[in-house]
Image (cartoon, helix red, strand yellow):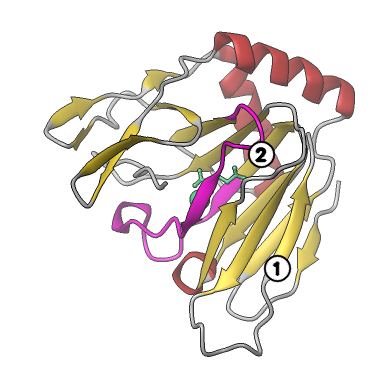
Amino acid sequence: MQPVKIHAPDAELCFWPELISPQDSKLYYQQLFSDTQWRQDKITLFGKTVNLPRLQAWYGDKEMTYRYSGIELTPEVWTPVLLELKALVEQACGSSFNTVLLNLYRDGNDSNGWHSDDEKELGEQPLIASLSLGQKRRFRLKHKESQSKAIRPLSLDLSSGSLLVMSGSTQSCWQHCIPKTSRAVLPRINLTFRSVIHGSCPMPTL
Ligand SMILES: O=C(O)CCC(=O)C(=O)O
Ligand SMILES: [Mn+2]
């Protein structure tokens, strides 16, 4: 399937609206929902520790151990279903990955705050492949230069089975988020496949 190129200044965005069929997406969603080692991670901001507004899990190659807040963490070992999805995504976008960060948005109160996936461990121009399963949620992007009002923010509805690939200068020039919604929504799982340099990790954002 050919992706749709989304044109925006300082960004490279490629979108597959239906990389995975609705039937297969449903099966993958159910399997990941029940078989993933979901964790309630916390973040400390200005001396206050709070729960992240979503559950997370991190899988990857064994040597991706990292240190975070004084503790050493190792990713969970790839499961057959995650390897299957990794292969599908790698084939679509022609890049390879060594980790995946999974997010579970349980309802409309769960969210992911404005951030860029620009940790130095991801390299200069990281390619991030974001696969969505379950409830459709809105994904927003805004250019980092608030003065450049001429550059319009973007909104994309990420439905089940869709793949969004962000590359080039997207992470250095833009931020993205999944806002809360007051609509009654079912859970959504998002997988961001990443290629991380040894001994590093994706850091949580609020
Ligand atoms: O849930 C999404 O679509 C985005 C997830 C994300 O930005 C991240 O995990 O860094
Ligand atoms: Mn992100």
- Residue annotated with mark 2: 131
User: Could you tell me residue 26's position as x and y percent?
Assistant: 80, 20
User: Which amino acid type is shown beneath numbered disc 1?
Assistant: Leu
Going 18% across and 46% down the picture, which residue do you hit? Answer: 47
Q: Are marks 1 and 2 in contact (CB under 8 Å)?
A: no
Quick one: label 1 or label 2, which is nearer the N terminus? Answer: 2
Going 62% across and 64% down the picture, which residue do you hit? Answer: 141
User: Could you tell me residue 28's position as x and y percent?
Assistant: 72, 19
Query: Up-down: is 186 above or below 77?
Result: below
* Marker count (numbered): 2
Provide the secondary structure element on which disc 2 rests: strand
User: Which amino acid type is shown beneath numbered disc 2?
Assistant: Leu
121 left or right of 31 in image: left
User: Could you tell me residue 100's position as x and y percent?
Assistant: 48, 34
Query: Up-down: is 3 above or below 110?
Result: below
Q: CA distance from mark 1 to mark 2?
A: 18 Å
179 left or right of 118 in image: right
Ligand 1 within 8 angstroms of badge 2 C-beta: no
Between marks 1 and 2 in the image, the one whose residue lies nearer the viewer: 1
Going 57% across and 13% down the picture, which residue do you hit? Answer: 80
User: Could you tell me residue 15's position as x and y percent?
Assistant: 75, 54
Q: Is residue 102 magenta?
A: no
- Residue annotated with mark 1: 154
- Residue 198: quadrant of the picture: top left
Dominant secondary structure of the residues highlighted in magenta in the image: loop
Q: Which residues are magenta?
A: 105-129
Provide the secondary structure element on which disc 1 rests: strand
